[in-house]
Amino acid sequence: MEQFNIIKQKIKQSGYTHEVDIEELYNLICDEIEDKISGEYIFMLKVTEDTHFEIKVEIFEEEFNLASITIQQNGQSFYIELE
């Protein structure tokens, strides 16, 4: 998907050097938002012992918007704006 490539590119531009499986991340987000009411949510995803993702999602009635991702790793923070 073109959107996945855009997200990968933005993650690299943030300075984060590790590979991120965007399709897996998308599927995890879909699982988390299932049955949630419309609104803004922040989900925390622990990737490794020293790496976690903070994912901001806006949920609408029929779709969702991945607003931003903040990656925290070893005291460093990488912010990715997606709106």
Image: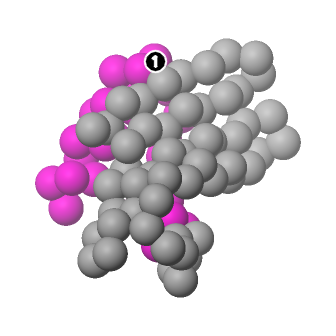
Q: Which residue is mark 1?
A: 15
Is 40 inside the magenta-drawn segment? no
Which element carries disc 1, helix, strand or loop? loop
**Where does the magenta region start and end?**
1-30
* Residue 44, above or below 10: below
Q: Residue at x 50, y 65 (%)?
A: 29
Q: Residue at x 34, y 67 (%)?
A: 60
Residue 9, image x, y percentages: 28, 34
* Residue 19, above or below 37: above
* Quadrant in the rendering for residue 12: top left
* Residue 20, above or below 35: above
Q: Residue at x 53, y 83 (%)?
A: 35
Q: Is residue 14 left or right of residue 70?
A: left
Q: Residue at x 28, y 53 (%)?
A: 4
* Residue 9, above or below 15: below
The reply to whether residue 61 is in sight is yes
Farthest residue toward the bottom? Answer: 35
Q: Counting other residues with Cα less than 10 Å from the Cα at mark 1, is it few (<14), some (14-19), or many (20 or more)?
A: few
Farthest residue toward the right? Answer: 49
Which image quarter is the N terminus in? bottom left
The residue closer to the viewer here, 60 or 72, is: 60
Residue 18, image x, y percentages: 53, 34
Farthest residue toward the left? Answer: 2
Magenta residues, dominant SS class: helix
Residue 49, image x, y percentages: 84, 42
Q: Amino acid at mark 1?
A: Gly
How many marks on residues?
1
Residue 83, image x, y percentages: 27, 38
The reply to whether residue 21 is in sight is no
**Snapshot colouring:** one colour
Is 10 inside the magenta-drawn segment? yes
